[in-house]
Image (cartoon, grey):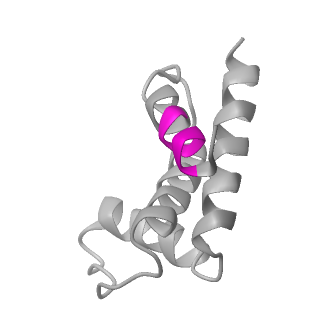
Amino acid sequence: MGLQEDFEAHAEKAKTLPENTTNASKLILYGLYKQAIVGPVNTPRPGVFYQRDRAKWDAWKAVGGKSKEEAMNDYITKVKQLQEEAA
């Protein structure tokens, strides 16, 4: 299985993570996913009154230096880690 297919499979698995997955872990996944799909942040940072959107933007910006392949690999690793913790 190629990296793209593996990434897509783990993106589906991420949807089944338990409810008690921490927000910090969800933000890490979000940032890596956006970096893998879109690339570096391409929007202005949301304003102070949009805390949720701002946290997501910050998580994406934090991984901005990663290549698409690095982001995909890190995403896959993180999903596997969260699945193991939930087991």
Which image quadrant for residue 70? bottom right
Give the total number of marks visible in the rendering. 0
How far from the left and from the top, in percent, is residue 54? Answer: 36, 70
Q: Position of residue 35 (x, y in %)?
A: 50, 68
Q: Residue at x 57, y 37 (%)?
A: 22
The N terminus, quarter of image: top right
Q: Is residue 78 left or right of residue 57?
A: right
Q: Is residue 65 magenta?
A: no
Start-end of magenta stretch: 4-9
- Please state which of residues 53 and 33 is positioned toward the viewer in this rendering: 33
The residue drawn where x is 75% and y is 21% is 84
Q: At x 64% / y 83%, what residue is drawn? A: 65
Indicate left or right for 39 with 62 as reference. Answer: left
The quadrant of the image that shows the C terminus is: top right
- Image spot of residue 76 (x, y percent): 65, 43
Q: Is residue 69 above or below residue 67?
A: above
Image: 4 above or below 57: above
